[in-house]
Amino acid sequence: MNAALSALADLDSAPATPPSDAAERRRLAMLERIVATPQTPAPSRPTRSPGRARRRIVVAAVGATVVLVPALLLGIHRLPHQGGSASAGLTSADLASWVSTSTPRDAAQLSASAKRWCIDATDGQAGSRASVRIEGGDQRGEVATMLITRGSDLDLCLADQAGGGGYWELVSSADSPLPTVPVREVLLQSAGQHGSDDVGTAWGQIGSDIEAVVLHLGHRDVDATVTDGIWSAWWPAAVVGDDSPTSATVTYTDGRTATVPVHTL
């Protein structure tokens, strides 16, 4: 009997140890945002290989499909498709405009429509009535990326230049602050594919000695956008692939470069 129970325990998908209070709050916030948002039916997901599936957690609710790094259940919110053959709210034209090297943009250089979409998309958070500040980000083709500070909340958002659709994710809040990162480490906080796996996203943190990051993703290298110690990137899965980054080439503040592993918590 003990052997049978032990075998069943090995198949249990529940974590071996209870999640922390912060992780539980993030999980509940994520589900609340997904359920509260009207969704269009998501296309069926292609079957993943068993090895890759073990590296991801899939959460499906009200037609939404979200894929997360298992270590962190952060608040991901995917809005409905906005026309065309879109994923994560991006159109086919948005995906076709993608480039692997981003162009840095400060807040004034980002389109007013993209900024308005991101402000409106993140406005429903609890305690979000504080003043909003948009940090600089980047532009890849027709899609802008930015960080939004609202009170104690920090969000990562990407939206097309016309403000027709996009994606956002809670980065940190008062009860879920970001960890301290060693000065020469690249940390992956979240990575996933959205919609019918057309769009991949990833973000994380870098140590204070790093000023630039090039991610090694599938069969392509992708420049990450770096803003205030947060790095981020997005890509069309058809062009880059759908694997999470496991290594990166970094440029240190002294000008030297190195290829380093991308760590997860």
Image (cartoon, grey):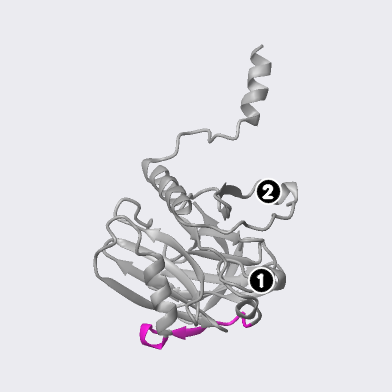
The quadrant holding residue 248 is bottom right
How far from the left and from the top, in percent, is residue 252? 47, 76
Question: Label 1 sits on what residue type?
Answer: Ser
83 is within the stretch colored magenta:
no
- Whether residue 11 sits left or right of residue 264 in the image: it is right
Q: Earlier in the sequence, mark 1 or mark 2?
A: 2
Q: Secondary structure at mark 2?
A: helix
Residue 21 appears in the figure: yes
Residue at label 2? 53
Does the rendering let one see residue 181?
no
Magenta span of residues: 97-109
Asked which quadrant contains residue 257, the reply is bottom right
| 4 relative to 16 in the view: left or right | right
* Secondary element at tag 1: loop
Front residue of this view, candidates 9 and 40: 40
Amino acid type, mark 2: Ala
Q: Position of residue 214 (x, y in %)?
A: 57, 74
Residue located at (41% from left, 66% from top): 121
Look at 60% across and 79% down and name the residue there: 94
Is residue 102 left or right of 241 when viewed as pictured?
left
Depth order, front residue of 224/60 = 60
Residue ID for mark 1: 85
